[in-house]
Amino acid sequence: MPINPAFTTTIDHVSILDEQGNFDSSLGDGLIPNEDVVAMYKHMLTCRHFDEIAFKLQRSGRMGTYPENRGQEVPSLAAAYVLQKKDWMVTCYRENAGLFWRGLPKEKILLHWMGDERGNFIDECNVTPLAIAIGSQMLHATGLAWASKYKKDGAIACTFFGDGATSEGDFHEAANFAANLDLPVVFVCQNNGWAISTPTKLECSAPTVAQRGLAYGMDCIQVDGNDIFAMVKVVKDAVKNARENNRPTFIEALTYRLGDHTTADDARRYRDADELEMWQKRDPLIRTRMYLEQRDLWDGAKEEEQLDLAAKEIIQVVKNAEEIDAPSATDFFDSMYTELPPELQKQRQTMRTSSLGQDPSQIEQTNEVRNSTNG
């Protein structure tokens, strides 16, 4: 019998605005209104300043470890721009631009990295708390999409993760469920070339990370993740596919973190200086500003004005975070369950952990004995 191909495919790469400012009007015209591009650029400037101040807070001992977002602003911002309010945005820890556009108060991110659990209490904008465990959030997004499909509420989930996270079992489980159960979820892999200090080429021997989505039957696309227009286009297409067809899409966004992995890292020990210089020229803020200036929508005066506004805003954000009232000792219990189990209610009331593994009534008996002895 003849040998015939069992499966053939291609994965397209999408680019609309490159680092030289060249703009593909056939793909980009009408995609984002100019006033929205201006608003998104202003937003990225503010987020970049937030990043700088957060870095200084950590270095001055006023905040714990912090992962800089510098250079990776576009993928999450593009998604937040496209998603509807009812949709879920499920992030890891380098998506400040999208979270803030979505409406998350900036203080929440500072509080999170300051170790204040109130930074993880989010009830404003259908986003989940930052996921530090690598890959866990993809399962959460798949579950949220499954719930939306079950409830028929028309919502989708969009989740973000790094290239290294695709080597985690959580990714494969989430992708398998999403594709086999026809779930409305968008997987955005932010391939920044590094899984902390491990280069992508050692994590994945395939020409694209997007190919990992093919194994599960997902539609897959690769995109210039520093191109706001290209990102908006591919996210729009993926969201449409999810909402209308209940099908998942894998987006591989090629981007780069211009800083260290976190403030606990020193990328100079493993990353070539020439590589960093190359990606600095591909900075999404430089590229977007170039587009605006070529159309007389931006200039140096507007830049200075926005930077001044950003500085004033972030000063207030830091003040709000640092001067927040001290947490109550009972806050630990308040967001754990919809209905707090009796044994934890007892712990909350008594502020004692001696009820662990015991009948809560034993605490009362113990207290009665102590009181009678002291009396």
Image (cartoon, grey):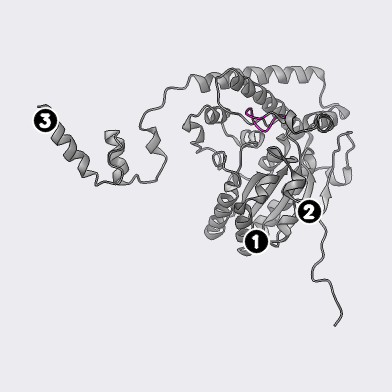
Query: Does residue 77 belong to the magenta stretch?
Result: no
* View extreme (front): residue: 269
Q: Residue at x 57, y 30 (%)?
A: 109
- The image shows residue 298 at horizontal and vertical percentages of 81, 24
- The image shows residue 179 at horizontal and vertical percentages of 65, 61
Q: Looking at the picture, which amino acid does disc 1 mark?
A: Ala
Q: Give above or below for 166 relative to 132.
A: below
Q: Nearer the viewer, residue 354 or 17?
A: 354
Q: Residues within 10 Å of mark 2 (few under 14, many from 20)?
A: few
Q: Which mark is residue 221?
A: none
Q: Which mark is residue 206?
A: 2
Which corner quadrant holds the N terminus?
bottom right
Q: Residues within 10 Å of mark 3 (few under 14, many from 20)?
A: few
- Residue 289 visible to an observer of this rendering: yes
Q: Which residues are magenta?
A: 259-265
What secondary structure characterizes most of the magenta part?
loop
Q: Secondary structure at mark 3?
A: helix
